[in-house]
Amino acid sequence: MGNSVSEEFEDTLSQFTMIHSITFLFRIITLGAGNVRTHKLRSALTVLGIVFGVCSVISMLSIGEGASQEVQEQIRRLGSQNVLIQSLKPPDNPNAQQETRNYVIDYGLTYADAERLSSTLPAVEVVVPIKSRDEDLWYGGRKVQVKLLGTVPWFIEQHAMPLKRGRFLTSLDLNRKMNTIVLGESVADKLFLFEDPLGQPVRLGGDTYRVVGIVMPGEGAMGAASSASDLASQGGDAFIPITTVRSRNGDFIMRRAQGSFSAEKVELSELILSVENIDDVLPTARLVEAMLAEHHPKADYKVIVPQRLLEEARKTQRIFSIVLGSIAAISLLVGGIGIMNIMLASVSERTREIGVRRALGARRRDIMAQFLVETLILSIGGGVLGMILGALIPWVVSRLSGLTTILTPGAFVLSFAVSAFIGVVFGLYPARRAALMDPIQALHHE
């Protein structure tokens, strides 16, 4: 019987204590909010530092994240399991050009390189050769400048280019060196307007080609755009069999000017090596570089490894985020100093009030809690406003400039946590100073 009464008394006491604590907390928050409302203009100016600081953190991180993701996506489109090799024109020798006005430059990748790499490297699953040049494509009286890509039928399979209509190149086209051409979507739209392109004849140089397909820009097109073609991501390419372009145009690019001419001999503009296992990409790239260095003493090539570029882009993004976050954190620091300054002034103004409250029985922790709550109201309120503004600014930037911005939950959590932390840290000293005041001296303060 006694135990049950004792347990009931303890439960009642604990409930009363909890209710009292909740009531006390509510009264402290109400009192703090009332004091903040009393000086509306001062409070508004005080929180501006926190608002702009939080807004800067979110905006900068979202813009930086958007730019980084866009770069990484472009690199991914090159193919994380690909190794790209491009022909690179060596620097001109002005002395050699002065000696003769007619000269020929022989550089870049060769068909022998493609055969050697395909047969020697066991990890390489597919080799895609590309021979590119700028050409004018004619249909009737209309002309469109295109990046002509001489390639192989499996180009579309390796790059996952969406086929809008018709077909892509076939082995028959390749073996018979047929005059068939596949157009990018934007080229077909500009050249044919409202006519049906399929089956139509187009003129390329002095030859006529038949349109057999239309491809849309896609991931594979971006891969070509970043290497062999600057227009592929917009569907601005034309594709013909590589055997045809070699048969019709040869390996020379001729340039004439005022009684002299120059010629460049380039067999292949680019080679794309597709590796079966992603773990073999970097070792294969090192073997490619070693083999090419042996047969190309002029270093007339460039090896691009998208996987390596992607890792570097991620490292850069991390550094970029740290730098941007640090810059924005300075605004938060300034805002915190502003809050502490205002709270110190508030403590001085309310010295007599503190003395009265202490004389009426308020404890030091009650005074400290009151000023800490006021500081937290200012800092957290500023943090919430800053998050709203920080979410709005990237949207405006994206709409006006077309830049990609990405709002991440981590930026909001970080900004809110920092604003609350600043409220506690910069409010602790003023609150402690108010709590440690001597009640008698505070009551005699004028």
Image (cartoon, helix red, strand yellow):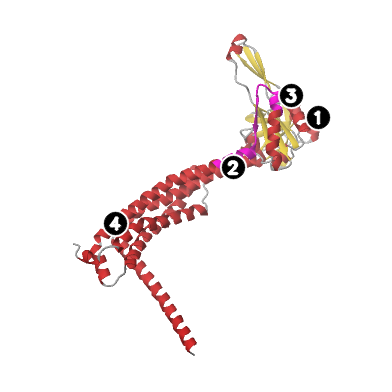
Q: Percent from the top left, x then y, of residue 184?
A: 66, 37
Is label 4 in a helix, a strand or a loop? Answer: helix
Q: Which residue is mark 4?
A: 344
Q: Which residue is mark 3?
A: 248
* Residue in the foreground of this view, choosing between 179 and 247: 247
In reply to whether residue 299 is colored magenta, the answer given is yes
Q: Which mark is residue 72?
A: 2
Q: Residue at (43%, 54%) from the top-left corner?
A: 418
Q: Find residue 281 and report its image quarter.
A: top right
Residue at (39%, 53%) from the top-left corner?
A: 51
In this rendering, the count of numbered labels is: 4
The amino acid type of the residue labelled 2 equals: Gln
- SS assignment at label 3: helix
Front one among 289 and 203: 289
| CB atoms of marks 3 and 4 within 8 Å | no
Q: Is residue 422 above or below residue 234?
A: below
Task: Confirm whether residue 193 shows in the render.
Answer: no
Of the image marks 4 and 1, the number of the one nearer the N terminus: 1
Q: Which residues are magenta?
A: 291-315
Q: Secondary structure at mark 1?
A: helix
Q: Describe the element under mark 2 as helix, strand or loop.
A: helix
